Amino acid sequence: MSSEFLVDVFELARRAAAVEGTLALAAAARLRNGLRHAEGALTFRLQGLHDARGRPAAVLTLRGTLPLVCDRCLQPLDMALDHEATFFFVRSETELAELPVGDEPEEPLVGSRHFDVLALVEDEAILCQPISPRHAQCSPVSSQQQRVERSDSPFAVLTRLRHAR
Ligand SMILES: [Zn+2]
């Protein structure tokens, strides 16, 4: 792995610096598991900053195409990825464990002087993958499916909402 992407994230935040690059799908073993093929790459940028609370933080921007397969028709489905996530960094696992749970949108990460940016990019791309990828015309919100679902069922509505995301 290129040491170029092993980054001191505290320094990155302090200097408000950024690292950017590409992650080849072929080099992302865990992400590849869910993909149709491993051609192509994701481009990313990790911009260091201090968040509103003065903590070392970073915004990750992720762009590219994920070659997926539609769960319904089993045909290729290329999903455009244009994603942004904000993280803040703590110094240790202990500090992480002491954080209150879920009171803010930013996600805490254990930072380091050799933080693996490519692993973060891969993790985030995996999180972006739908559990059940479907073409718009193959999704349960299509007219055909809607007629089958009971419109008065709150579960039908929930199902549609979930799949619409
Ligand atoms: Zn489909």
Image: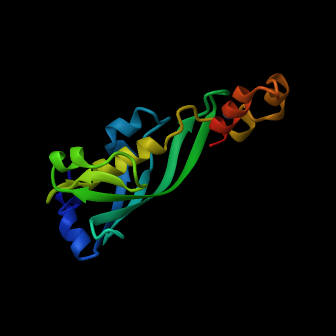
Asked where in the image residue 112 lies, by quadrant, the reply is bottom left
Q: In the image, what residue occupies the spot 85% across and 27% down?
A: 147
Q: Is residue 10 left or right of residue 63?
A: left
Q: Where is residue 45 in the image (x, y as percent from the top left)?
A: 37, 64
Q: In the image, what residue occupies the spot 75% across and 37% down?
A: 137
Q: In the image, what residue occupies the spot 18% across and 50% down?
A: 95
- Classify the position of the C terminus by image quarter: top right
The residue nearer to you, when weighing 138 against 51, is 51
Q: Is residue 91 left or right of residue 43?
A: left
Q: Is residue 82 above or below residue 123?
A: below
Q: Is residue 82 left or right of residue 94?
A: right
The residue nearer to you, when weighing 160 against 19, is 160
Q: In the image, what residue occupies the spot 53% across and 33% down?
A: 131
Asked where in the image residue 127 lies, by quadrant, the reply is top left
Q: Is residue 88 above or below residue 140?
A: below
Q: Where is residue 105 in the image (x, y as percent from the top left)?
A: 43, 55
Q: Position of residue 99 (x, y in %)?
A: 27, 49
Q: Quadrant of ligand 1?
A: top right
